[in-house]
Image (spheres, helix red, strand yellow):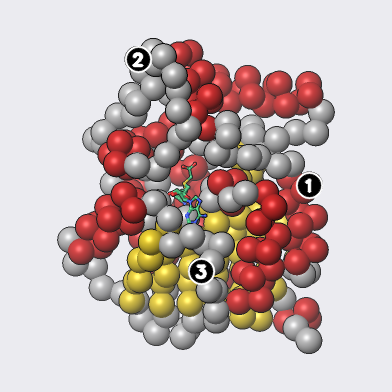
Amino acid sequence: MLQNGGHSTGMNRDNIYALPRNKVGDFAFDEEVVRVFPDMIARSVPGYASILSMIEQLGRRFIQPQSRVYDLGCSLGAATLLLRGQAPTSCELIAVDSSPAMVARLKETLGGSTSEGCRIEVHEADIRDFPVERASFVVLNFTLQFVPAEDRQVLLRRIYDGLLPQGGLLLSEKICAKEAEQQALLTDLHHDFKRAHGYSDLEISQKRTAIENRLIPETLNSHTSRLEEVGFPLIVPWFQCFNFASILAVKTLENIE
Ligand code: GEK
């Protein structure tokens, strides 16, 4: 189910914000969200399924034998489960999320799975404190946006330092535009996407209120500049659908002192 990128058939439907609320609290990755998460992300993030399938392809390219592969902010492990198929048994696949509910569900999924492959470790931890070492491929698929803006640079520098030569970082984010008019159009297009996938105007508006203090988007340019500042010599924005984008950053050999 997760391996097809969270296609919305046959999974619990997200109707968390379907009824009017007197007060909409801050969004949390709790049990209620875990129950509907694959449906929620598939119907909320344009391009999510395409990005996941490219993560699998990129894993094939970047994962090196005897290295570590990290899925930071793994949620229910959609990327982890795909990358497992790409990693030789000499690798360690490390999935990290700060939400106890997400981690518990991923452990359950992995416990019930029979598929063989490399060792997978699942950690309930804040990625801001989690060590990254000997990494050939690091995935931050829509996670950095939830990390306080002032902590993003330090985190990315630690990831850069923990990557092996020729290692890759995949960074997907909700982004914003510099110009107000562009931003308004992107927001409209995103809301059209959500409507087309069955969300009502009430659901869209209540979810927006819930998430606006938790998810802080930046421009594509801010992301690429920061990646450059932390040391990545090769940065390629490779995907954008409305206000959702994905960037590949590579630590090439030339950059190693
Ligand atoms: C996917 N990557 O399906 N430390 C650890 N985890 C965190 C932190 C943090 N500081 N902040 C947020 N999270 C997944 C989707 S969802 C994206 C990622 C979304 C976790 C949070 O608990 C949640 O599980 C995840 O990051 C973000 O490919 O819901 O839009």
Q: Secondary structure at mark 1?
A: helix
Q: Secondary structure at mark 3?
A: loop
Q: Is residue 77 above or below residue 160?
A: above
- The amino acid type, in three-letter code, at marker 1 is Asn
- The amino acid type, in three-letter code, at marker 2 is Leu
Q: Which residue is mark 3?
A: 130
Q: Which residue is mark 2?
A: 19
Using a 10 Å C-alpha cutoff, classify the residue at mark 1 as few (fewer than 14 neighbours), some (14 to 19) or many (20 or more): some
Q: Which residue is mark 1?
A: 221
The Cα atoms of the two marked residues, 3 and 2, are separated by 38 Å
Q: Are marks 1 and 3 in contact (CB under 8 Å)?
A: no
Front of the two marks 1 and 3: 3
Q: Position of residue 183 (x, y in %)?
A: 72, 26
Mark 2 and mark 1 lie on one chain; the one further toward the N terminus is: 2
Front of the two marks 2 and 1: 2
The Cα atoms of the two marked residues, 1 and 3, are separated by 26 Å
- In front of the other: 13 or 98: 98
Q: Is mark 3 within 8 Å of ligand 1?
A: yes
Q: Is residue 131 left or right of residue 227?
A: left
- Quadrant of residue 202 within the rendered picture: top left
Q: Residue sitting at 42 percent across and 39 percent down?
A: 28
Q: Is residue 6 left or right of residue 154?
A: left
In the rendered image, is residue 147 in sight?
A: yes
- In front of the other: 144 or 148: 148
Q: Position of residue 20 (x, y in %)?
A: 39, 13
Q: Residue sitting at 45 percent across and 28 percent down?
A: 25
Q: Residue sitting at 24 percent across and 68 percent down?
A: 115
